[in-house]
Amino acid sequence: MDLIERIDQWGRTTPDRPAHISGGEVLTYRQLIAKSDLLADHLIKTLPQDRSPVGIYGHKENEMLIGFLGCVKSNHPYIPLDTSLPAHRVDAIISTAQASLLLKPDDIAQLTHRGQSSNFEMRRLQKDDAWYIIFTSGSTGDPKGVIISRGCLESFISWILDEQGFKDSGEIFLNQAPFSFDLSVMDLYSSLATGGTLFSINKEDIAELRALYQSFAVSGITTWVSTPSFARMCLMDAGFKASLLPGVRKFWFCGETLAPEVAANLLQRFPKAEVWNTYGPTEATVATTSIQITRKILEKYPALPVGRAKPGTLVEVHDSGGSSVPAGERGEIIISGSNVGLGYIHRPDLTSKSFFEYKGWRAYRTGDAGHYQDDLLFFDGRLDFQIKLHGYRIEIGDIEANLQALENVRDAVVIPAMKQERADHLVAFVIFKENPTGSEFENMQRLKKGLGSRLPDYMVPRRFIFLREFPLTPNGKADRRKLAEKIQ
Ligand code: AMP
């Protein structure tokens, strides 16, 4: 597959078809191709030819897509950065990635307003050239940037299109996830590769159910891509059913556990639609396994499987010694194959911990526990302190390190408060260096504000509990189990 060529051809064959609709603004394929060529031309002329990354900082604007393709066509991988990231975090990402430029939608609009580029020559990516770099939470407080090559992305998209039988038929894909979260890669490139329309909903829509439903009613969405958390939120309203979205034929989920009741409710309210569960980390390009969740699967398995590996991939469960375990036994999920990324940008230390060569392929230790049953993979939780909160991937250590960097904080431990076996919100336990002045409420507000300037809102704990000491385990570490008992 030549993904860029596939996308560009829509500019020639169906130039007036909408490529992206966001907040009522429409970007056609003609505009997308012409403007991304213009941007690429500008980047080739102004940036060193060193394949250095370019940050694209915005939300769901049409210019985000122009920015992404403009970077790729100039052989500079892009880093999608959502506006939910505070300036401190954006600075940390730009500096870790050694990015040569940070572009915002206004910059992109200005650079591309002319409309068409003359005699532009695209820089074609080789298989192992980076296409994008997505930053995820890192356990020591520094975000880490996963490098995804052209080969990885094309392997992933080819699989999705084959499996789902998408023809070039102009599907309309829901884009719920911010572009900084790799779930969005699933809808973005499935749509662009097939001449479809990406229908983005923005954070204002999501915060206001009525606005969201108005968006849905006019959307014509045929393929729904979101986290299970988002679907669960929509299902809380009885109006979320086939009459609101009569065109939906598929629900695709990835990123966190799909609860059986969410799948069952969707099948009931959208009788003509299929529900799919897919699994995988950013490091292995969005998703590596998949399964259609039918009524039969729901009846048979109380916890839903995440499916079978995509072709060209080996997904094994290993014991701590690195040997594959028999079906039914738990171990760590190891992914190897064509969709495993190139590692973490400028972090060879972290890369060598998690990426390795296995049976001649690039392989990744997911840190996920899992087992096989009936030739199907099941996800059994994490082996470390990474969590998913409402679909967001968070390293608990990232929040703790950023809390400890705040003034007067001696030590901090963060624990997810659980509800029906899912993380519901975060609770921070904090020890101050010196007795602070002010009430507990004021101190909590001060810490929330300090943390909010370093981390996105979804990583700021909802509750704070101030202690003089932490209970300790026999080997002298903060006893997380005892702390968790205080909040459950
Ligand atoms: P991210 O890199 O944000 O996509 O997060 C990857 C992690 O999300 C995986 O390592 C798993 O822990 C979790 N995850 C992804 N897909 C699923 C799924 N279908 N079911 C359960 N957990 C999942």
Image (spheres, rainbow, N blue to C red):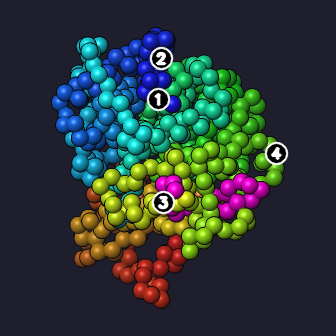
Q: Earlier in the sequence, mark 2 or mark 4?
A: 2
User: Where does the C terminus fall, quadrant-wise?
Assistant: bottom right
Q: Nearer the viewer, mark 1 or mark 2?
A: 1
Q: Is residue 478 magenta?
A: no
Residue drawn where x is 54% and y is 54% of the image? 336
Q: Identify the residue shown where x is 33% and y is 38%.
A: 78
Q: Main secondary structure of the magenta part?
A: strand
Q: Residue at x 51, y 54 (%)?
A: 361
Disc 3 marks a residue whose amino acid type is: Glu
Q: Residues within 10 Å of mark 4 (few under 14, many from 20)?
A: few
Numbered mark located on residue 296 in the image = 4
Q: Nearer the viewer, residue 83 or 297?
A: 297
Pinpoint residue 61: horizontal percent, then vertical percent: 37, 28
Reading the image, the residue beneath label 1 is 3
Q: Which residue is mark 3?
A: 357
Residue 10: mark in rendering: 2
Taking depth in this image into account, of 23 and 428 the one nearest to the observer is 23
Q: Which circle's residue, 2 or 3, is located before the other in the chain?
A: 2
Nearer the observer: mark 2 or 3; the answer is 3
Graded by Cα atoms within 10 Å as few (under 14), some (14 to 19) or many (20 or more), the crowding at tag 3 reads few
Q: From which residue to which does the magenta span run?
A: 360-379
Distance, label 1 to label 3, CA atoms, is: 27 Å
Q: Residue furthest front?
A: 360
SS at mark 1? helix
Q: Which image quadrant is residue 420 in?
A: bottom right
Which mark sits nearer the N-terminus, 1 or 2? 1
